[in-house]
Amino acid sequence: MYILLIRGAAFFSSVGEMDYSGYGVLSDWVYSLISPIGTGAVFGGIFLVFIQSLLINIIVAKFRMATTVTLFPGLFYALLVSVAPEFLALSPILLANTFFILALWELFESYRKNNVAGHIVNIGFWLGIASLFYFSEIVFLLLAFIGLNVLRAFRLNELLMLIIGFCVPYIACAVYFFWYDGFGNFWQAYVLNNCAFLDIKIDLNIATYINLALFTLISLVILFSVNVYYAKKNIQAQKNISVLFWGLFFGLLSFVFQSNLRLEHFLIFMVPSGILLSFNFLKLKPQTAEAVHLLLFAAILIWQFNPNWLNI
């Protein structure tokens, strides 16, 4: 119900009318089954965010990343992926975030374990799937490499496992398209066409500046709260938090090479940002946290309806 409320503005807006074709072969396949325009896509996005928020809450609780077990991480992820009207669509990157979350789960599972071959292959596999939904997710292959070095003594054979796991979805797609004599189109449309240097397609208007200011504010809050995140945490939790910060860095790196980059690309930050921002609220007094959350919730709802109410 909470996610339905926070994303309900999508029923009254035209965000789903954007063209999302070409960002990934799997996202195009999804759009062949369910149109990105209409009520079905809105409900699909609501259900997807619910599943993603649930997974995030399980991960944070399972690996004891927070001082207490709460629903805040998933709640703040749901808030952040709904903060701008453009985020309400069933976009390729929102689809890809599901598999990035699964890759993070597998990455955290590798901490201080001897037999981790399955986890490492799964990390690569889920990131491969994610990048077939939205090509920029390929940058998190570097995050997996760095993360494994942070969490454990990483070896060369484990790097090969990671790469093999990542290549499996691409090999499967390549075989399929080759069988139907379309490998050249697959490579051109879903790999080469998604690579360009600083190919930013964001319209600069008042609404965009407000969105960018909001993203900057969130980033500054996270940046200046580093000590809060690491305080009174065990070694495993601190290492996992370090991985999340690396995720923010590599998300920023993806802006350099993704073609046809639009405002929805900022969703690439929202998994680590939602988790980290929730830790700030755990440090607040309950009454203060409730008041701040209520203000955020109301402000986001107002901003989502801004095209209809404010005509910005």
Image (cartoon, helix red, strand yellow):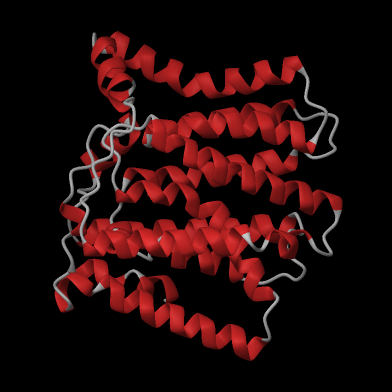
Q: Is residue 130 visible?
A: no
Q: Residue at x 30, y 9 (%)?
A: 179
Question: How many numbered dots are placed on residues in this image?
Answer: 0
**How far across and how far down the image is residue 113, in percent?**
84, 35
**How far across and how far down the image is residue 73, in percent?**
59, 65
Answer above or below: position of 221 versus 97: below
**How far across and how far down the image is residue 181, in percent?**
24, 8
Q: 232 or 28, which lies in front? A: 232
Q: Residue at x 25, y 32 (%)?
A: 22
Q: Residue at x 54, y 38 (%)?
A: 250
**How far across and how far down the image is residue 158, in percent?**
72, 20
- Taking the image as shown, residue 23 lies to the left or right of residue 242, namely left
Quadrant of residue 289 within the rendered picture: bottom right
Quadrant of residue 296 within the rendered picture: bottom left
- Taking the image as shown, residue 240 lies to the left or right of residue 231, namely left
Q: Looking at the rendering, in which quadrant would you find the N terminus? A: bottom left
